[in-house]
Amino acid sequence: MSALSDRSAGRHPGNAVAPISVKIVISGGFGVGKTTFVGSISEIEPLLTEADMTDESVGIDNRDPVPGKVTTTVALDFGRISLDEALRLYLFGTPGQDRYAFLWDDLVEGALGAVVLLDTNRIEDCFPAIDYFEEHGVPFLVAVNQFQDTRRFELEEVREALGVDGLVPLVLCDARRRESVKSVLVALTEEVLVRRLAEQAAAY
């Protein structure tokens, strides 16, 4: 049992401290696994704004890298996960197509941090998300989604291809597995905490 659980074990429900709620953004390119990521971890039925891809999207959405994909997120994916009794994360998945970029400012506003999902077969698809979070000062990490039959690379090779700062965490992820997704979210919250503590120390 954790120290947090020890402190809470003897409390009556009426005296329980409400958990801290924070917002996390899940981003990345089209078909990279954002909807799967949110659905794998959410402790509530996730809100998924999926729509069928129609002939009208031909020439707009490039389906070649993901030929079996028949739906797409048109607004956001939403889920919730409690990491422990003191911390509750609300997950907001961004749409992957450029034509929905106007939604990003509202989705990202107030976010504690972000996860950028990456497919090593289409590494360039995550550049817009990385650029956005860097420009807006949003802490983020890059999670390499390990698709089946995808060529594996060392994380430092991925970092070199991305051209991101050495301080940006890179982790491996399987968006289909709950424990893998949870480890990514824990890594992000720890990274944000370390940054906040460093900023506070520098201010004194």
Image (cartoon, helix red, strand yellow):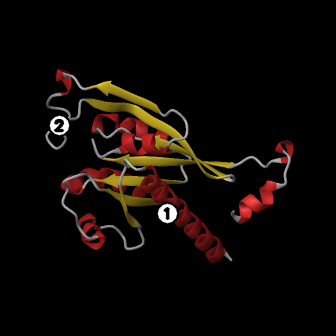
Query: Which of the two labelled residues, at mark 1 and mark 2, occupies the earlier sequence position?
Result: 2
Residues 202 and 34: in front is: 34
Q: CA distance from mark 1 to mark 2?
A: 31 Å
Quarter placement of the N terminus: bottom right
- For disc 1, the neighbor class at 10 Å (few under 14, some 14 to 19, many from 20) is some
Q: Is residue 60 left or right of residue 86?
A: left
- Kindly identify the residue that appears in the image at 49 percent across and 54 percent down: 182
**Disc 2 on helix, strand or loop?**
loop
Residue at numbered disc 2: 63
Asked if one can make out residue 138 in the rendered structure from this viewpoint, the answer is: no
- Kindly identify the residue that appears in the image at 20 percent across and 55 percent down: 150
Residue at numbered disc 1: 187
Q: Report the label total.
A: 2
Q: Is residue 161 left or right of residue 3?
A: left
**Disc 1 on helix, strand or loop?**
helix
Amino acid, disc 2: Arg
Amino acid, disc 1: Ala
